[in-house]
Amino acid sequence: FVLLLVCLISTTISVSASVSAESAPQVIAVAAYLPEWRTRSINYDALFTHVTHAIFFSLEVDPKTGLPTAKDRLPNEQVLEEAQVAMRKANAAVASGVADVTPRAKRHAILCFGGNGRSAGFSAMAKNSKKRSKFVKALVKLLVKNKMT
């Protein structure tokens, strides 16, 4: 269920005023940007009732090795479990058509790399095939270890 932030940036959503709710279903993405200092104080049940994408901010990439760094910014195991349980409940509600979950779209957790002065190592990693390969392998291992797959 983890996507890269780049997917959101490259996606645009347009809603036509001439299309009525009865004539065509509309899928709207609502994202919440969650800096590491806020992840422990969030009610994830309430969040995923109205948010489709929770973006956990932000790990970095080491420019020399191409590996993920600042992993202490990841939510701890308890917080990740709370978020995943809430996300599964919201996804079940969407699938079953329960009225109290809006918008009616699948919920996702996204792990963000860079932003706010934390992006220096990303381009060095992205332009080097060996570093990219190491990064992807390390990222998959990190996601599996933290049950974010």
Image (cartoon, helix red, strand yellow):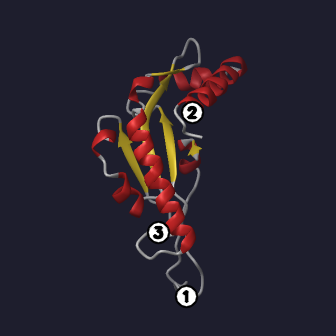
User: In the depicted view, which residue is nearer to us: 60 or 92?
Assistant: 92
* Between discs 3 and 2, the one toward the N terminus: 3
Using residue 128 as the reference point, say whether residue 74 is left or right of it. Answer: left
State how far apart marks 3 and 2 are (Cα).
27 Å
Q: Hey, what amino acid is under mark 1?
A: Glu
**Where residue 143 sits in the image (x, y, percent)?**
57, 33
**Where residue 73 sits in the image (x, y, percent)?**
39, 28
- What residue does disc 3 label? 103
- What residue does disc 2 label? 143
Badge 3 crowding class, 10 Å Cα cut-off, few under 14, some 14 to 19, many 20 or more, is some
Reply above or below: 58 against 34.
above
Report how many numbered discs are placed on residues in the image.
3
Residue at horizontal 66 percent and vertical 18 percent from the top: 131
Extreme residue toward the left, this view: 41
- What residue does disc 1 label? 22
**Where residue 123 sits in the image (x, y, percent)?**
57, 25
Secondary element at image label 2: helix
User: In the depicted view, which residue is nearer to us: 70 or 95?
Assistant: 95
Secondary element at image label 3: loop
Reply above or below: 77 against 62.
below
**Where residue 111 sits in the image (x, y, percent)?**
50, 38
* Between discs 1 and 2, the one toward the N terminus: 1
Badge 1 crowding class, 10 Å Cα cut-off, few under 14, some 14 to 19, many 20 or more, is few
State how far apart marks 3 and 1 are (Cα).
15 Å
Tag 3 near tag 1, CB within 8 Å: no
Using residue 72 as the reference point, say whether residue 125 is left or right of it. Answer: right
Please name which of the two marks, 3 or 2, marks the residue nearer to the observer: 2
| Location of residue 145 by image quarter | top right
Secondary element at image label 1: loop
Q: Hey, what amino acid is under mark 2?
A: Leu
Residue at horizontal 47 percent and vertical 48 percent from the top: 84
